[in-house]
Image (cartoon, grey):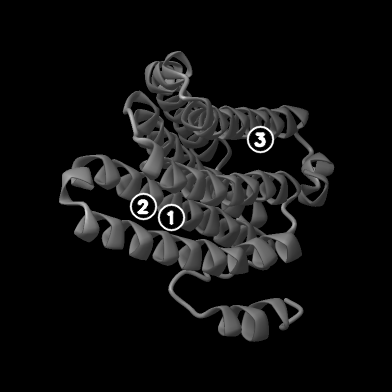
Amino acid sequence: MENMNLNKHISGQFNEELENLRNHVMKMGGMVEQQLTNALNAIETTDEELAQEVLTSDFKINLLEVSIDEECTKIIAKRQPAASDLRLILAIAKAITDLERIGDEAGRIAKVALKSFSGAQQEFLISLDNMGRQVLKMLHDTLDAFARMDVDAAFEIHKEDQKVDREYEALTRQLMTYMMEDPRSIPKIMDVLWSARSLERIGDRCQNICEYVIYFVKGKDVRHITRDQIEKDILGSGQ
């Protein structure tokens, strides 16, 4: 986190606490990214064992979220941080909630690998995988932007969510058409549909994390405002 200037504090222990907090968040991010990777690989290779591993290891992410949240609370109580230090801790506290939810969505996606699909239905798994790889890259780039607190990268990733939304809408239309043509396929296709929805939600979570990066760097809460407003009023303000 080069841009965070963690060495500015007189208290070396405070620096260490912030660095440990940062390391734990990136560890959690890495675990979540691996969960999504495994879920997508399980679908691609119909690997039930890998899918089960995703489902059974989710508790590790949950435990880490609780641990990091406790760290944030202790630092606030002990150090009473202000300005950028407080924004950093608040950004981390919010980000870990989104990361935990991404882990949950990865588990839902992994369940598709436990189903059997006919040859005609395999094309939808391919479409799901294509969307999944796009979202996986978005997650990877989001974690990288968060690690460096790179506001420009965060804004570019924020815009990527539009592509994910379009991909989701296109896949949904395909799935709905297929179900109307073959009602017997509805239970299986619904599994794919819900997985696509999970991927779309992961894109939203990545977008949230990017907003936390902007909040930390610029000191402005950009939730619920348009991208044009963010670009013009926040990023272009020079604040």
Image spot of residue 1 (x, y percent)? 77, 43
Query: Label 2 belongs to which residue?
Result: 197
Q: In which quarter of the image is residue 143?
A: top right
Q: How many other residues sit within 10 Å of disc 3, few (<14), some (14-19) or many (≥20)?
A: some
> Residue at horizontal 63%, vertical 85%?
233
Between the C-alphas of marks 2 and 1, the distance is: 5 Å
Q: Pick the residue in front: 234 or 62.
A: 62
> What's under tag 2, amino acid-wise?
Arg
Percent position of residue 78, x then y:
53, 34
| Local crowd size for mark 2, using a 10 Å CA cut-off: few (<14), some (14–19), many (≥20) | many
Q: For mark 1, give the secondary structure.
A: helix
Can you tell which mark lies on residue 22?
3
The residue at which mark 1 appears reads as 200
Residue 194 in picture, x, y percent from top left: 31, 47
Q: Position of residue 218 (x, y in %)?
A: 67, 68
Q: What element carries label 2?
A: helix
Spatial CA distance of label 2 from label 3 is 30 Å
What residue appears at the point 69 percent right and 62 percent down from the top-left corner?
Answer: 217
In-front residue for pair 229/49: 49
- Where 93 falls versus 237 (above or below)? above
Asked if 126 appears above or below 151 in the picture, the reply is above
Residue occupying the point 58% across, 70% down: 220
